[in-house]
Image: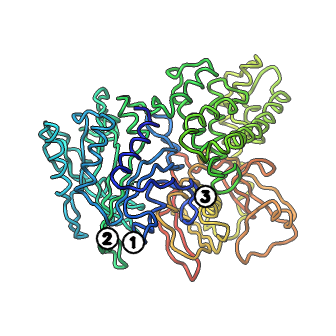
């Protein structure tokens, strides 16, 4: 079955069992300001799972486009995508385990035709602390279902997260009990991570085994269904949504027991063709084929670039379907990043000229017949992406122009550094230009480039020591890094929470940064994660940090941020991460000092992490963050 066939069959299967087929929700949540994107099928249904009556009844089914920008760094292997479709069915206080598990089993083994010998399942081991029992009901149901297929499925406890689940699978075992890290679902994860008022419950997952994939001990001594080596792929999750977190940290049962089922359409499609490479399925392979055709490279020659391009453009296309346009804030910013990353990756395939107008129509073709909202606006959608490509290529062109002026007969590390430092033109593009223009490349370019980069960092450090008054306890390297991290974090908080976020205080020691800001409520774990991801992305992007002195009015016109209550003179120093007149991610009125490049914050594999989020005073929140 193709992915489109699986989607239709799933909707029909559950419609035949009394479910109302509901339309997918927009990728930009309309009534949920806590998250930038719809990331699961249940998200738009939370109010109904909490007890509100749904106008279409107590049995619902849909296929929900989901977008998880936080998975961006995983894209490139054979199974991660940022956009996917989640097949979902829900019981709002209607049926429960005894119907849900057999139905999904029948769908997989009957409708899709998966070999039951390739299927493994999991259930919740229980949580004594929170008084939540072991889910033996699910295990019993699974045993019976396997038996119907002539399989004597043995049950086992796989252990806990602390021991790395390193027990392995003994002969005949197919039903595994895991702890809350694996078999408990809420939007915030494990019971202890759930905020007050959040709903969750134990879940039961089904895995497909790709027998041709050998276990890799890099992921642990023994393989098991939840191992990340790629041998097992989770293809569906039945959440028994029945608890709500109380003020005192314990759990109350919800008024009604619900089923919240979600399955990755793309994953079931991969299982259906028995290929562990998700990019071989009918919703991705045509994009890869087009890239092969346009570039002259085969998929095997550069799978990573092709996967990234296919994933990112498919995601950006869907964002366009849902009305997002590239910009410098919120959803538009994420979309811009995705399109630009795809175009950068395309350079590795020698796709140096506009190609989106040829690839995006292939993507829309894959969905057109099943999604009228895409068909109705197809030309407009394609155009949104094509225009962004044109604009980005102009930025790239400016770098190339400067390259021509500066390179001469031999490309030196110094020139590469200058292009990088002043125009944001990445070193690898300078090298490519040199190859193309047959300009000789100085063999020692890398050494010189690195030396200049270090010198520049030292220079900016010396130049700015002593200039900064507020917040910084000292001028050690690490405090300077935390100062830059404070700027990036400020920007990220505004992107995630909104423009009402204003700095109310800052304090930096070599151990951590502390930042106070206006915001009326507690941040959700998801928001914290988003802020961390954005800052880490800025670190990875290695933006140059520089300052210039400008009239105060101009600084604000340019979008520079200040702190609440600060007084400014006629002119101010504005620190920018990026090019102040071009592409930048943070602009702030500040005396410094800062690192020369945001990448310095990530040296030694360090990541920005928020360790604490708490109230500081009424309407003001406080975070403490570290680079670790
Ligand atoms: N909420 C569960 C998930 O997202 C099932 O829908 O996996």
x and y, in percent, of residue 469 in the image = 70, 69
Look at the numbered disc 2 and give the secondary structure of its residue. strand
How is the protein colored in the picture? rainbow
Query: Which sits earlier in the primary sequence, circle 2 or circle 3?
Result: 2
Residue at image mark 3: 485
Q: Residue at x 83, y 31 (%)?
A: 401
In which quadrant of the rendered view does residue 442 lie?
A: top right
Question: In this image, 85 relative to 450: left or right?
Answer: left
The answer to whether residue 282 is above or below residue 324 is above
In which quadrant of the rendered view does residue 272 lie?
A: top left
Question: Residue 51 shows which numbered tag?
Answer: 1
The answer to whether residue 496 is above or below residue 103 is below
Q: Residue furthest bottom?
A: 618
Residue at image mark 2: 256
Q: Is residue 461 visible?
A: no
Query: Which sits earlier in the primary sequence, circle 1 or circle 2?
Result: 1
Q: Residue at x 75, y 64 (%)?
A: 589
Query: Which residue is more in the foreground, 289 or 402?
Result: 289
| Cα gap from disc 1 to disc 3, whole angstroms | 42 Å
Look at the numbered disc 1 and give the secondary structure of its residue. loop
Q: Is mark 2 within 8 Å of ligand 1?
A: no
x and y, in percent, of residue 302 in the image = 54, 24
Question: In this image, 506 relative to 60: left or right?
Answer: right
Q: Is mark 3 within 8 Å of ligand 1?
A: no
Q: Residue at x 64, y 22 (%)?
A: 294
**Pointer 1 with pointer 2, Cβ within 8 A:** yes
């Amino acid at each position: 079955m193709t992915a489109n066939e699986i989607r239709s069959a799933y909707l029909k299967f559950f419609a035949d069992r009394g479910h109302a087929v509901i339309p997918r929700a927009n990728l930009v949540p309309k009534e949920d300001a806590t998250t930038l994107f719809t990331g699961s099928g249940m998200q738009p249904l939370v109010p109904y799972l909490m007890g509100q009556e749904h106008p279409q009844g107590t049995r619902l089914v849909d296929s929900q486009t989901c977008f998880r920008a936080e998975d961006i760094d995983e894209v490139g292997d054979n199974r991660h995508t940022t956009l996917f479709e989640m097949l979902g069915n829900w019981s709002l206080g209607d049926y429960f385990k005894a119907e849900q598990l057999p139905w999904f089993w029948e769908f997989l083994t009957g409708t899709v035709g998966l070999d039951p010998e390739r299927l493994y399942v999991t259930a919740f081991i229980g949580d004594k602390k929170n008084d939540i029992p072991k889910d033996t009901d699910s295990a019993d149901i699974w045993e019976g279902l396997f038996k119907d297929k002539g399989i004597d499925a043995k049950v086992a406890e796989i252990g806990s997260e602390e021991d790395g689940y390193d027990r392995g699978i003994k002969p005949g075992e197919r039903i595994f009990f895991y702890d809350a890290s694996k078999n408990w679902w809420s939007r915030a994860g494990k019971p202890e991570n759930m905020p007050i008022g959040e709903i969750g419950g134990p879940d039961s997952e089904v895995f497909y085994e790709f027998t041709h994939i050998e276990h890799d001990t890099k992921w642990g001594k023994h393989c098991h269904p939840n191992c990340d080596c790629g041998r097992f792929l989770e293809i569906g999750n039945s959440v028994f949504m029945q608890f709500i977190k109380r003020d005192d940290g314990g759990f109350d049962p919800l008024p009604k027991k619900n089923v919240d089922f979600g399955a990755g359409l793309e994953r079931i499609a991969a299982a259906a063709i028995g290929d562990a490479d998700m990019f071989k399925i009918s919703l991705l392979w045509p994009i890869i084929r087009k890239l092969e055709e346009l570039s002259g490279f085969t998929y095997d020659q550069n799978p990573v670039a092709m996967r990234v391009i296919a994933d990112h453009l498919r995601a950006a296309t869907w964002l366009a379907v849902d009305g997002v346009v590239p910009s410098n804030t919120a959803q538009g910013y994420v979309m811009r990043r995705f399109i630009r990353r795809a175009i950068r990756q395309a350079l590795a395939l020698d796709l140096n000229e506009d190609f989106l107008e040829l690839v995006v129509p292939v993507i829309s073709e894959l969905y057109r017949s099943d999604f009228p909202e895409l068909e109705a606006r197809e030309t407009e959608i394609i155009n949104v992406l094509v225009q962004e490509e044109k604009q980005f290529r102009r930025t790239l062109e400016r770098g190339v122009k400067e390259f021509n002026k500066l390179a001469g007969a031999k490309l030196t590390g110094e020139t590469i550094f200058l292009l990088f430092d002043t125009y944001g033109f990445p070193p690898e593009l300078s090298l490519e230009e040199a190859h193309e223009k047959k300009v000789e490349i100085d063999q020692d370019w890398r050494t010189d480039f690195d030396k200049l980069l270090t010198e520049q960092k030292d220079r900016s450090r010396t130049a700015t020591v002593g200039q900064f008054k507020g917040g910084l306890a000292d001028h050690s390297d690490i405090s300077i890094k935390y100062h830059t991290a404070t700027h990036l974090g400020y920007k990220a908080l505004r992107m995630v929470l909104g423009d009402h976020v204003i700095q109310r205080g800052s304090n930096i020691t070599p151990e951590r940064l502390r930042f106070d800001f206006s915001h009326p409520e507690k941040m959700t774990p998801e928001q914290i994660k988003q802020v961390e991801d954005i800052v880490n992305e800025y670190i990875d992007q290695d933006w140059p940090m520089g300052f210039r002195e400008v009239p105060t009015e101009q600084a604000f016109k340019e979008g520079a941020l200040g702190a609440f209550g600060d007084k400014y003179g006629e002119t101010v120093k504005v620190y920018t991460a990026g090019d102040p007149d071009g592409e930048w991610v943070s602009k702030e009125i500040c005396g410094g000092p800062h690192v020369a490049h945001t990448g310095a914050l990530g040296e030694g594999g360090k990541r920005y992490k928020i360790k604490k989020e708490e109230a500081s005073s009424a309407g003001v929140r406080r975070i403490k963050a570290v680079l670790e």
